[in-house]
Each structure stands twice: as structure tokens, then as C-alpha cells.
Amino acid sequence: MRALVAEEAGEPTDVLLLESRPVPTPEAGQALIRVNATPIHASDLHVLRGRYGFAPEFPTVGGHMECVGRVEALGPDTEGLKIGERVVAAAVPAVPGPPMAGTWQEYLVIDTRRLLPVPDHLSDSDACQLAVNPLTALLLVTRELDVQPGEWLLQTAAGSTVGRLVIQLAGHLGIRTINVVRRRDAVEEIKAFGGDEVICTEDEDLLQRVAEIAGSAGVRKAIDCVAGQVGAQVSQALAPGGEVVVYGALSTHRQTNPAALTIPLQARSVIYDTKTVRGFWLNRWFGTASPEEALRALSQVRSLVADGDLSIPQGRPFPLEHFPEAVALAEAPAHGTKPLFVFEDSRNGDNG
């Protein structure tokens, strides 16, 4: 089989090579998946650079997140799935937990407890992106913060993939959103997408606008994907007792010095207003959630997408051979399109 392999940590286009590897064999409790489509996330590239929250053992197959495919074989005494069944593989390594095989290969062996059956009417593009961004949005809103209908939710990076999914999910659940963007031309786009209020940090004061929008009751719940000064302002803008969950650091996207990855919080605001700032990382959630809990959450995401309550932007397909072009698209600023590695499935044709 073909596999996209990094021999060592480094810039993805420098260290990735297309190799031929033997098809792996599943053991008890595992399935062999013939991969149809798998995305390229920014975090996949940070893993290869050695700048993420976990480090694989090199050489490693790229793609440490998710894919869609069909069950090709089952390990001995393995039940619950059928040969030929179409499944999403949540290949996010649990932290702490054992290593996971990368998804940028034609065949993948994975624990069956990480597999969720998906209907054929769901496109490959949708299915192969179920287990990371939509799941993150769902967990942030409903489990981490338990935002209730009618409550305000403040979020940064509203134009990002997760940000847009949060807006859709909030609309479905009756939650009101205050959405922070950094460009003026994004304001109307986010409003048209369903954002209730939009703050542009390019020419607006975040604290002042939050106070104007939320009034005396204020905002008690926020999610932040920017960190840095914007993340600090979000914390400061919260009402007493408020909490912000930080799940990314886009303001330091190109930063290679860990000491520069900061959120300069105001101690008085945190202490006297008893505010909480904490992190969320999907890998660590998988490390603490039971397999049953993880599959329940994934099933909820599958229903939201299948019913049209959450819409995932159509990805752009690439064959493995075109990985330099695919990686370049994943790195392009405001590209808006997720590159996907796609493999032909002779039984199912091109489904996405």
C-alpha cells in the first residue's frame, strides 16, 4: 500500500515521502480499514514539526486525526462490525494513551472502539471531518461550558472552522453568540452565517463592545482559540465568576518559542472577580473519556451533520502524490477549504 511517511521531525514538505508499505494485519479488537478520505489539519502539520502536544515515534505515517473508509478485515474474535461497513475512524491519539497509526495511508489498523458506522448518504468529505472539529465544537459548548438556551457565549476566531460550527450549534440550541473577528470584511459574513453579534478587533474595543452587548448581566461563558492579548481581553470582559476555555493559540501560529505562547491575564480581574481560565485539548479528552462516552459524543455529531443542523465545508480532494500542493493549501491564510487526501474505492466509487 501507499503511505505518506515522515522520517523525522521537520517542515512537512521537507520530511514527507511517499512510500510503499505492507498492508497491516488487525489483531483481536481491531479492524483493518481501507481509507477513502482523510483531511489535512493544521495540527497534523504541527505534529510533524514537533510543535504539538504529543510527539509520535519517527518515522511516522502522517495524519493523526481522522478518516472515513470501509472495514476490510477484522481481527480474531472481533465483533460489532461487518466487512464492507462504512465507518469513521477517530484516530486522535489519547493523552495519556497508546500511539495511533497515521491516516495518510491506504489501509489503517485501529481499535474497533474508535470506529463509528456512517450512512452512505453522508459524503466522504463530511464523514472524514466528523471526529475533530464538529466534535470539538459540541464538547466545548455542551460539556465543557454547558451553555444553556438564551445564554450568551463569547467566542474568538469566529471565522475558523470550529468557530462557524459553534455558531451553527448555538443557533440549533437557542444560544446567543458574540463573535470576535480580526478583519472588518468578516463582520457581515459572520452575521449572515448566523452570528448574533460580531466584534471586530481591527477597529473596536472588545471589552467595551461586550459590555454594550451583554449589559449589566454580562457574559459568563467564553471559548478562545487565539490566546495572546485577545485571549486576555476575553477573560477581562467576562462577568464575575465567568469562565473561558482556551482550545487554540492562533495568535502564535508561527511561534516556535514555547515561552512566547502566553495569555497575559490581569491578576486583579482573575482574583477579585473569581474568573476561571482553563484549557481544552481533544487528545486529552480522549484520554479521560471512556470508549462508550466517546462513541456517544461522536454519534451525536453524526446525527447533527446527517440532519443538516451542522454543515461542514466541502473539502478539496488531492491524491497522495500531490501532497506538496495539499500541504500548501492547508497552510494558506484564510483558505477556507480543507484539503483531503482521497483514495479510490472500487466498491463505492467517488462518494465525496
Image (tube, grey):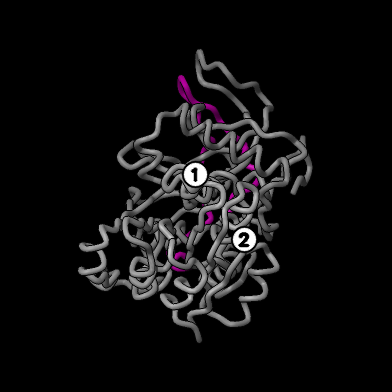
Question: Which residue range is magenta in the image?
Answer: 11-39
Residue bearing mark 1: 142
The residue at the point 66 percent across, 53 percent down is 312
**Location of residue 2 in the rendering, given as x and y in whole percent from the top left corner:** 57, 47
Q: Secondary structure at mark 2?
A: strand
**Within the magenta stretch, is there residue 311?**
no
Q: Is residue 20 above or below residue 293?
A: below
**Location of residue 150 in the rendering, given as x and y in whole percent from the top left corner:** 56, 52
Q: Name the amino acid, label 1.
A: Thr
Q: Is residue 47 above or below residue 14?
A: above
On screen, residue 238 versus residue 140, left or right, reads: left
Asked whether 295 or 92 is in front, the reply is 295
Residue bearing mark 2: 339
Asked whether 22 or 267 is in front, the reply is 267
Q: Is residue 75 above or below residue 295?
A: above
The residue at the point 68 percent across, 50 percent down is 125
Q: Name the amino acid, label 2.
A: Pro
Q: Which mark is residue 87?
A: none
On screen, residue 283 versus residue 147, left or right, reads: left
